[in-house]
Image (cartoon, rainbow, N blue to C red):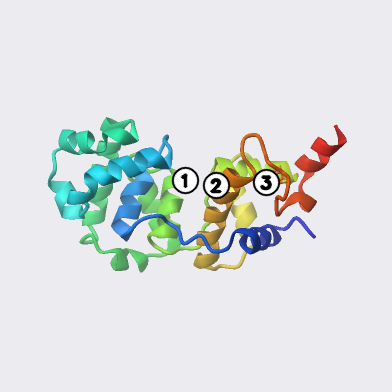
Amino acid sequence: MSKGFLQIFEKLYAYYGPQYWWPADTVFEMLIGAILVQNTNWNNVEKALIRLRPVLHPEKIASLKTDELAALIRPSGYYNVKAKRIKAFLAWFKKYDYNIDKIKQLSLVDLRKQLLNIRGVGKETADCMLVYAFEKPIFIVDTYARRLFKRIGLQMPDDYDDFRTQVEASLPDNPKLYNEYHALIVEHGKVHCKRKPICYECPLFHVCDQQIEDNIT
Ligand code: SF4
């Protein structure tokens, strides 16, 4: 089997199946979750979302004072910073009447540029929003993807966008594929390719340099 990005995707998909991401009831919840998950784990995000649920609507959150919002999202950590970031995101969202469909009509390049101009929205957060809220085809570069491709033995650039475009160059322009790929990499990073990998029965075992090294040493 070759070590192409598409082949890796196919192996992961065959093993884990569809992931049905993002874990959110609504697109708006996804967008807020993408900010809450910065520098924390998903368990803390879920706790914050439970407290936020009664006001989980753009106009309701926009009407809260920043410190009221911060108090609600406290379990997600960095809550004062994240409250300001959510407010900044909502100010941008309002320009489109909080209408996801209007935003979807923008090109990927234009929309990404706008998202990156929002204070507190970095590349990984913007790309999660692009894939899971606005259904655009873009590869999300995160710790799991960096670790996985390095262990497999692929030469990947450190720079976020160089890494991203290297992967995208060999994948079809299909938003659903990018949706599944990121979710599968996260799942794989939690089940097999953990910080200390569990290589036994890994679906990528036969293409991975890491397990070959481990077996030799
Ligand atoms: S064989 Fe091990 S190191 Fe390689 S991808 Fe699988 S779990 Fe990760």
Do callouts 2 and 1 mark residues in contact (Cβ within 8 Å)?
A: yes
Residue 190 position (above or below residue 6): above
Who comes first in sequence, dot 2 or dot 1?
A: 1
**Three-letter residue code for mark 2:** Val
Q: Residues within 10 Å of mark 2 (few under 14, many from 20)?
A: many
- Secondary element at image label 2: loop
How far apart are labels 2 and 1 at the CA level?
6 Å
- Closer-to-camera residue (94/70): 70
Residue 140, horizontal then vertical, whole percent: 52, 51
Q: Which residue is mark 2?
A: 141
User: Which image quarter is the N terminus in?
Assistant: bottom right
Q: Is residue 17 left or right of residue 22?
A: right
Image quadrant in which you'd find residue 192: top right
The x and y percentages for residue 40 are 41, 35
Q: Residue at x 17, y 33 (%)?
A: 67
Lower sequence index among marks 1 and 3: 1
Per the model, the C-alpha gap separating discs 3 and 2 is 11 Å
The residue tagged 3 is: 149
* Residue at 60 percent of width and 49 percent of height: 188
Helix, strand or loop for disc 1: helix
- Res. 76 visible in picture: yes
Residue 71 x/y as whole percent: 20, 33
Neighbour class for label 1 at 10 Å: few (<14), some, many (≥20)?
A: some
Q: How many marks?
A: 3
State which quarter of the image contains the C terminus. Answer: top right
* Element at label 3: helix
Marked residue nearer the N-terminal end (3 or 2)? 2
- Image mark for residue 124: 1
The residue lying toward the viewer, choosing from 26 and 153, is: 26
Q: Is residue 180 left or right of residue 147?
A: left
Tell me if mark 3 has few (under 14), some (14-19) or many (20+) residues whose alpha carbon lies within 10 angstroms of its own: some
